[in-house]
Amino acid sequence: MAVLPFKRKKTTPEIVDTGAMSGSQNVDTKKLKLVIRVSSLSVESIEKRDRILKIVSTVLVYAFLVVMALVIILPFYWMLITSLKTDTEIRATQQTFWPQEVMWSNYADCLGRFNFPLYLCNTLIVGIISTIGTLITTIFAAFAFARLEFRGKDTLFTVFLMTMMIPGEMMVITNYITVANLGMLGADNPVGVFASMIVPFWVSVFYIYLLRQNFKQIPNELYLASKVDGKSDWNYLWKVMVPLSMPTLISIFILKLMGAWNSYVWPNLVADNENYRLISNGLRTAFTTTAGDPEYGLQMAATVLVTVPLLLLFIFFRKYIMRGVGRAGIKG
Amino acid sequence: MERKNNWKAWLYLSPVIILMAVFTFYPLINTIGISFLRDYDYTTGANAGFTFDNFGYVLGLTGIERNGQMVFYTDVIRYAIPNTLIIVFVTVPLSIIVALLIAVGLNSIRWLKSIFQTIFFMPYVTNAIAVGMVFAVIFDYNGLWNFLFGMNNTYWINGGASSANGMFALCVYIVWHALPYKILIFLSGLQNIDKQYYQAAQIDASPRWKTLMNVTVPLLSPQILYIMITSFIGSFKEYSSIVGLFGKSGTSGQGYNNMYTVVYYIYDSIKNNNTHLGSAAAVMLFLVILVFTVIQFKVSKTRVHY
């Protein structure tokens, strides 16, 4: 017997005699068939209609997703082909979706005038040192909040979480004054400039929260077992908890590195000198003619150089990035 | 044991506490303090005493006397505040709705799902400045947008484009850039919804859009609330996208700061040694964000189902 979909409310089930009642007083229930008549539609036609509806809606869903995916991809595509066009072609009224003349020389010119290796080096210095610092402080704090008992723990954790609600602009002004008055921002003071780009970012409450959640999932028995074995908290943290939380730590590492790659505001304030600029800061001011017109071809070549490493990172560490980013929403 | 753990815990926490004391808690108090100082100069610490005027001056309510005339500063009230509000109230609802539709679509398909997921996440792993510059090319006078939609002779981001056109281009870019995070959060929320609800809806023969409104949205409400709060806060602070799209000048070529936002003003105040005014703006921004967040939590108490 077919499973009948109940598609309309105004239906009256009826029992059709398929020979079960004839001749015998005992009704053979197995031969009874339940039929639901919906405005003269039979079971077959309802199923058929449902299948058509399902196909149509699936096609619509795919069409919607394809259109949206094109909208998402278009700027990437445009960046790529613009970086290979001549300036006249970029500014032509008739836009082209494929460069008429492929200008690889844009990249050579770009590398000649845009100090990519220097910016890359600066960004990596800032990114890696601030990431390692963040990992250390985060591991310690998450361990204390997840495993140790001390007075005022919940209050302190709540205060930490509340600071996430405060806009960073409240802090930026005073932080700038702090580093400026410490004399760290001189053009001849690379250590000071780099320190002021790194040290304020050694703490991330969000990552402490993320790692604490992860530490809490590690069963208590492991801790007690290590206590029986005479291991100290310090050993337990580095030998058990950190290795078990590696996926989260890798997520934090990559997200933090991406953050350094994308950070603009603070480095723009503190690293005024050309030699200390990070990649985003060097990028925006690059390739504008003396008349103020942007040289789009070269700009886009530089943009490709800045975007591709990120996309490569994403392709190789997709799982870690998406897990790290998505974790936030699970608890609501 | 209890006592031992106590000091040990504080030892583990000490790096974080010291750093947060210097770079979070002290600045918080200090910035509020500066916002009440008249003519504060951060290089010397000199100021002319306590005042409430900074707030009035930022809002264009209090004038400053210059050459015997009262001068009112109106960039914030005329450009920064309206622009910030437009960004908040256009991009947040729009990006939430589009992201929700994409997430529901993604959740209902099987074929090519992971490729779509990867594509929709791509804008997240981009540099806001870099992509802003790409959108600047697209919205150029001779750019792709004008070509695709046949809008000749329309300036969007430079050449003296009107504020409305500038805002339009900015909102398109912000929504594009804001989608992936929201899609990801919604999708992980959708995957946690029990399939039984949908089977029940199917048996009741409820149409798809009704299922969306009456089953999916309520069950996804914790994620929607989270996204709403974070993106409200985020879009009150829009800055890098403006620098990316319009360059450092903060204008669409009008000759004044017509693409200003509140945060833009705050950062400018540091460069101009107007930190007392910037602090006043920051404190007001903080209060506004606080009020919005509290309202959203209050509303969520009746609307969000956990």
Image: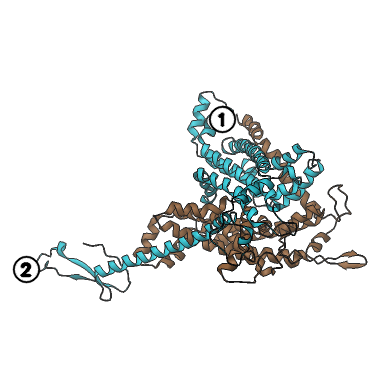
Chain colours: A cyan, B brown
Contact between marks 2 and 1 (CB within 8 A): the answer is no
Relative depth, front residue between A305 and A44: A305
Residue A332 in sight from this viewpoint: no
Neighbours of disc 2 within 10 Å: few (<14), some (14-19), many (20+): few
Residue A51 in sight from this viewpoint: yes
Q: Quadrant of residue B154?
A: bottom right
Q: Quadrant of residue A100?
A: bottom right
Residue located beneath label 2 in the image: A23
Q: Is residue B224 left or right of residue B113?
A: right
Residue B238 sits above or below residue A198 on the image: below
**Percent x, y of residue A203:** 66, 41
Relative depth, front residue between A286 and A9: A286
* Kind of residue indicated by mark 2: Gly
* Kind of residue indicated by mark 1: Trp
**Percent x, y of residue A228:** 51, 25
**Percent x, y of residue B160:** 71, 68
Residue located beneath label 1 in the image: A238
Cα gap from disc 2 to disc 1, whole angstroms: 83 Å
Neighbours of disc 1 within 10 Å: few (<14), some (14-19), many (20+): few
Q: Residue at x 11, y 68 (%)?
A: A21
Relative depth, front residue between B291 and B243: B243
Furthest residue in direction right, as rendered: B68
Q: Secondary structure at mark 2?
A: loop
Label ID, residue B104: none
Furthest residue in direction top, as rendered: A230
